[in-house]
Amino acid sequence: MRLCRFDEGRLGVADAAGVRDVTAALDVLPGYRYPFPPYDVLVAHLPQVVARAGALAGAAPVLPLGRLRLLSPVANPGKIIAAPVNYQKHLDEVKSDVQIHANNPAHTITIQKAGVFLKASSSLVGPGEGVVIRKPERRTDHEVELAAVIGKTASHVRAAQALDYVAGYTIGLDISIRGSEDRSLRKSADTYTVLGPWLVTADEIPDPGTLDLQITVNGELRQQSNTKYMILGVADLVEMASSFYTLHPGDVVLTGTPEGVSPIEPGDRIVATVERIGTMEVSVRAEEDGAPQAGAAHASAKV
């Protein structure tokens, strides 16, 4: 199933006809009082939500996808975990380009030595919200990635069992300011983590290690690869991350980007595609341009 969030926090099931409004399925979620749980409540109860959404979908109103403002399919991740230099050709381009590595030795070592890093949850937006360039005087790059969403609490999980802890997958954009600072600082600006267009439940992607992915900017192909070229696959990344942190439902694992990273600027139109998930369009704007309007981002169920 493809579950999306849109407009003012409504819930939809995306299919070839459009988006079926199944917001009533949220009624299966339990209520909480402060202190709230340290996880995403919807993802923690995803099987119940999926069952209820499936029951409602047949009679639900169908909305045109292009008229919806798509939000991140995960509303409240406790952590956004990211994998640096997880494609060998990207590591090679980082090593060869001073504008990317900025003379920081930490940017040119392998992922096995670098480990994962954290992005602020406040950087999270959906495709309909767009990317706002925070430091216009600095080079800011696009990075397209497969994103895995954790479905249940995981600690010290072995790779052989790791995919059992994944609720589903979505497309991720890890927007990056280039410079010598720590990755977590440069990649955690507001709007610099884009997830969408929807969450595809894990049963529809049994093998996340064989997916084509690409990104175009203003119609120009910038990145194109396949997740089989990841140095550490999804299961390995979950094993690594869970050896340091307890993972909770809704935590996001960004799996790294292939070669071809390059600058973006206000006015650009990004189109990111991952096989078996779909396509999302994301606008880039300057801070003074204001909020995007409904319909400013579109998505496709094409694979």
Image: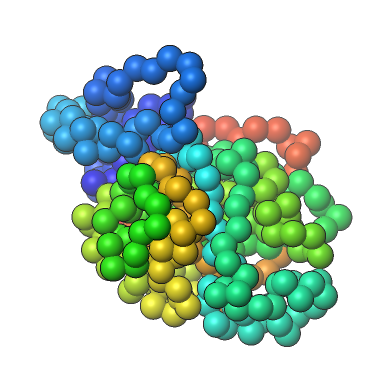
Which of 8 and 237 lies nearest the eye of the viewer?
A: 237
Q: Quadrant of residue 273?
A: bottom left
195 to the left or right of 180: left
Residue 235: % across, % down: 36, 66
What residue sits 31% from the left and 41% below the top?
Answer: 3
14 to the left or right of 129: left
Which of 122 and 127 lies nearest the eye of the viewer?
A: 122
Query: From where the camera sits, is residue 98 visible?
Result: yes
Please tell me whether residue 120 is drawn above or below residue 175 in the rendered image: above
Q: Quadrant of residue 89?
A: bottom right
Please tell me whether residue 270 is drawn above or below residue 8 in the rendered image: below
Residue 278: % across, % down: 36, 57
- How many numbered circles does the render carry? 0
Residue 222: % across, % down: 58, 72
Which of 165 and 123 lies nearest the eye of the viewer?
A: 165
Query: From where the camera sits, is residue 68 visible?
Result: no
Which residue of the protein is positioned furthest toward the right in this rendering? 137
195 to the left or right of 23: right
Please tell me whether residue 175 is drawn above or below residue 216 in the rendered image: above
What residue sits 34% from the left and 67% below the top?
Answer: 159
Model colouring: rainbow
226 to the left or right of 21: right
What residue sits 27% from the left and 50% below the top?
Answer: 201
What residue sits 70% from the left and 46% below the top?
Answer: 189
Residue 141: % across, % down: 68, 62
Q: Quadrant of the C terminus?
A: bottom left
